[in-house]
Image (cartoon, rainbow, N blue to C red):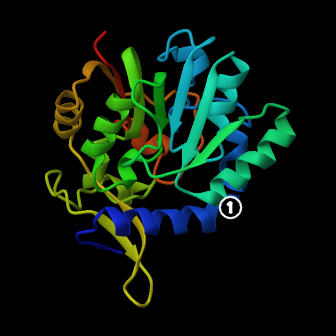
Amino acid sequence: MEHRPAGPIESARANRLWWDASAQEYQDEHGDFLGDADLLWCPEGVREADAQLLGDVRGRSVLEVGCGAAQGARWLVAQGAQVTAFDVSGGQLAQSRVLDARSGVRVDRLVQADAQALPFRDATFDVVLSAFGAVPFVADSAGVMREVARVLRPGGRWVFSVTHPLRWVFADDPGPAGLVVRQPYFDRTPYVEVDDGGSATYVEHHRTLGDRVRELVAAGLVLHDVIEPEWPEEHTREWGQWSPLRGRLMPGTAIFVSAKPA
């Protein structure tokens, strides 16, 4: 692993291949916590059924960005929304069809696409959302904000969750090693994992809280809230770098709630 530049094409290719290869393993490891048809915003356990960040979705046209196996999209279908879901990974979308069959709730409109170039017409959706999907994995996240603003109808809502930018400075370790500063907060050089030949196999891009706000505003969107979920006292599950130890000391997730002006 290293920190080095990684552009849009390299990032998209690396992450598509990574998620294709790990889709089954990811679902096996986290599927019980994610649920087959549930919209989970973050490892802290915030669920849309409780948080209501999207508002009433019944009868509304909804797009999920970076849907993975479409657990969130499936929950939205069950609430009566008209849902389109997309992901860069065909492997993740294949897992979605497995969950369709198991849950009895089907997402009819699944699309394989890159969030930096949405294959949808202007002003198509009432709500766009992303729960840890796409936004941290693309080189041009400002472009994603512009694309979301383009496909949103006036008055539409855009809600997305990402790893809290503060976590960038620490190692991805749920234990004490994850409490030691390793990386400058203002260093936006991507985190890149490479194979033996030096080709990127995984890429993640860092933006500060201020960067995210500026990207939203530049896209013509209005920021209504930034939610930093606290770690629940009763929550003992570790998920990658998320753990009770770290969660009780620092935020692990940032959820941005915004809208397109009516």
Front in this rendered view, residue 105 or 182: 105
| Labels in figure, total | 1
Mark 1 surroundings within 10 Å by alpha-carbon count, few (fewer than 14), some (14 through 19), many (20 or more): few
Instruction: Say left or right for 255 vs 132.
Output: left
Quadrant of the frame with the C terminus:
top left
Question: Do we see residue 46 in this rendering?
Answer: no
Choose top left, top right, bottom left or bottom right for residue 62.
top right
Question: Do we see residue 212 in this rendering?
Answer: yes
Percent from the top left, x then y, of residue 92?
Answer: 64, 54
Residue drawn at x 50%, y 11% is 55
Percent from the top left, x then y, of residue 205?
Answer: 30, 56
Front in this rendered view, residue 18 or 221: 221
Front in this rendered view, residue 171 or 159: 159
What element does badge 1 sit on? helix
Q: Which residue is mark 1?
A: 25
Quadrant of the frame with the N terminus:
bottom left
Residue drawn at x 73%, y 21% is 78
Percent from the top left, x then y, of residue 195?
Answer: 45, 83
Instruction: Say left or right for 5 vs 25.
Output: left
The single residue placed furthest to the bottom in the displayed view is 197
Percent from the top left, x then y, of residue 155?
Answer: 36, 12
Seen in the picture, residue 221 relative to 17 is either above or below; the reply is: above
Front in this rendered view, residue 203 or 165: 203
Seen in the picture, residue 210 relative to 60 is either above or below; the reply is: below
Seen in the picture, residue 189 relative to 168 is either above or below; the reply is: below
Amino acid found under the numbered disc labelled 1: Glu
